Each structure stands twice: as structure tokens, then as C-alpha cells.
Image (spheres, grey):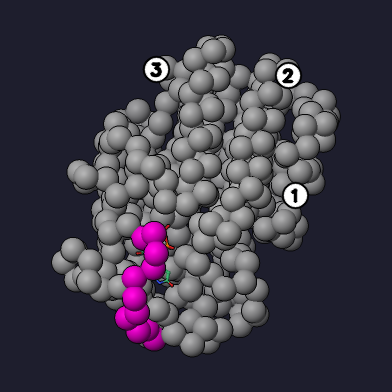
Amino acid sequence: MRILVTGGTGFIGSHTVVELQQAGYNVVIADNLINSNIEVLDGIENITGVRPAFEKVDLTDITATKEIFKKHKDITAIIHFAALKAVGESVGKPLEYYGNNINSIINMLTCMREFDVRNFVFSSSCTVYGQADVLPVTEQTPKKKAESPYGNTKAICEDIMNDFAFAENQFKMIALRYFNPIGAHPSSQIGELPNGTPNNLIPYITQTVAGIRKELSVFGNDYNTPDGTPIRDYIDIVDLAKAHVTAIQRLIDNKNKSNIEYFNIGTGTGVSVLELIETFEKATGRKVPYKITARRAGDIEKIWADTTFANRELGWKAEVPLSESLLNAWKWQEKLGSLKL
Ligand code: UDP
């Protein structure tokens, strides 16, 4: 039994490979390395003692994708992470985003059918909820129109999975809707490797504290929240990785209640940008230089997860405290040094 992890050298993928291997699964990673680094395999091996099989493949190439399944005949499940993911970039490059993210999922599902692989876990996002009218969001919260081509690819991929699951009900699928993944492996062997100037809050903070960036811009303090800054649900990367192991196990054990299921993967707690900075400073003993600037276009005001369904059905719960996730993110940054990525 082997799990195909697409995008397995990326931030979430690499942490998931570690948890899968530690749970006893064999893994093959498929990644084109456009947004990740082959050295990640060393980090995975250092933590687990096992170097996962690796295939450098562009998953929009159906012929090359089929070769993975011909070579690794023991693949029984797929976790599909591989995708372009920069929200801002997607606005300027919609065809690249739709082309990559939609074609690759269609190719994965096509291979599932051709090679009779029945279990599929997809990395979706809370972006599908947009600014929900009622908080926290449950899996039944209505989806809203996406703010960016990137967000729209997640919504479209969920629709494709849904229609495929309806048409061919021998296939079992789970979409995990992530909230805001943060942190790094506590060993500091793997972590986030942002490409160029980080868009996300935590890598921007750690790079600022490391002296790579001058100061953090806090995008707006005039939101309708207690301190005026936006609220998110920050989920530790190892907790998030473990959710994938429970999802895979659920499918393999046939414990799923329908052949497509959706789960919110968050902590259930909302944290503002200023609260997050304060927690980072306390956890690391480092000051975060910041200034308040204008709002960032497309940002929603507040969102956090109702995790009741995931807690009950997956038997999974976020466990790592925010301060620990932030400390791990900082330790990882220290390991990278002041190297400009
Ligand atoms: N944010 C910020 N400065 C930054 C990056 C992010 O103030 O340099 C804020 C952003 O407005 C949002 C939160 O941090 O409220 C999380 O942003 P991120 O891009 O990490 O994730 P998002 O929830 O937007 O996908």
C-alpha cells in the first residue's frame, strides 16, 4: 500500500509525508519543484529515517502522470496538494492558475479511474466560504463567489470532485478545507520556503525579525473586530498534516459516510493580527517591527472554523498551542539564517 502525495515537497505536503511515514505508510511524492526544493527530501529523511520515493512530474501532462501509476503499482490513495497558490499572482495570471490547478486535478481523477485507485484527499481552503455571514463557519456554510482566480480554482476543484463522485460512486473523496496553516516541524528540519517576498503573515513576520525585511505592514486596523485588525484561524502545520493521515485512514477503512465529504481543518479559535504579533513576541522574546497601513484588497474581515464535525468524524483535533507554532516558525527561520529566498 502506497500513498501518492502530489506537491509533497511543498510546505503542507512535506509535513504530511512525515506524518504518513511515521504512521507506517509508504509514500511516493510527485512534484515539479517549481515552488519547492529537492533538499526537502533530506529533511523528511532526517526526521523519519525513510527517504520517500520521488517523481519529478508536471501533473498537467497526462502521459507523464500515468507513468507514475504504471511504475508504482501499489498506489492505493492520493493526497493532491500540487497547485499554484499565490492569491495576488493569480489575479494577473488567471490562465496559468486555471490551467495548472484544474488540469492537474482532472488528470489525477482520470488516473484514479484508469488505474482503479479509489481514495482521494484534496487540499481545499476556507477561501471557499468568502466572508461568511455567520461565524464560526461549519461545512454547511454556503460557499461564496471567490475573490481571486486562485480561490476560484479551489471551489471549481471541489465541484469537479463532487460531480465525479456522483457519477462514479466507487471512488471516495475527502476535501479538507484548511484555515491558515502556520509553523514548522519542531525538529526544524522542514518548514515554509516562501518564494521571494512572502505574502503570508507568519513568514513575513519571521523574515522581518530576522532582518531580511524592514518592517511588517499590518493591513488595516479599521475592521469591525475588537482591535480593528482581521481575524483568522491559525492552524499548526503538524496538526494539519495529521488531519490528512486521519482522512486517508477513514477512506481506507471505509468509515466515510458518503463518497464525498468536506471537513474544516482549523483550531476553532479566531486570532487578530495584533494578537498574533503579541503572541509571537511573548513566545520568542523578539520584537516585531510593524506599522499600520491601508487594507489589502480582497482581504476578508474575519473567519474561524467550527471544527465539531472534523473532531467527531475524523477523531482529529488541533493540539499545538499558537505560541508553540510561532516559536517553531521562528526556529525554522533562524535555521535558514538571513538567506534571502
Ligand atoms: N497580513 C498583514 N500583513 C502581511 C501579511 C498578512 O497584516 O504582510 C494580514 C492579512 O491582512 C490577514 C492576515 O494577516 O488579515 C493573514 O494573511 P495571510 O496572507 O497570511 O492569509 P489569508 O488569510 O489572507 O489567506
Mark number, residue 161:
none
Q: Which residue is mark 2?
A: 115
- For disc 2, the neighbor class at 10 Å (few under 14, some 14 to 19, many from 20) is some
Q: Which residue is mark 1?
A: 32
Label 1 vs label 3: CA separation? 34 Å
Q: Residue furthest left?
A: 226
Q: Which quarter of the figure is the N terminus placed in?
A: top right
Label 2 vs label 3: CA separation? 24 Å
- For disc 1, the neighbor class at 10 Å (few under 14, some 14 to 19, many from 20) is some
Q: Secondary structure at mark 3?
A: loop
From the viewer's side, name the closer residue of 76 and 159: 159
At 35% from the left and 41% from the top, the residue drawn is: 144
Residue 223 at x, y = what percent?
23, 66
Q: Amino acid at mark 3?
A: Lys
Q: Which quarter of the figure is the C terminus placed in?
A: bottom right
- Magenta span: predominant SS is loop
Question: Does residue 281 sit above or below 157 in this rendering?
Answer: below
Q: Residue 76 appears in which quarter of the rendering?
A: top right
Q: Is residue 268 left or right of residue 118?
A: left
Q: Is residue 9 left or right of residue 323?
A: right
Q: Which residue is mark 3?
A: 257
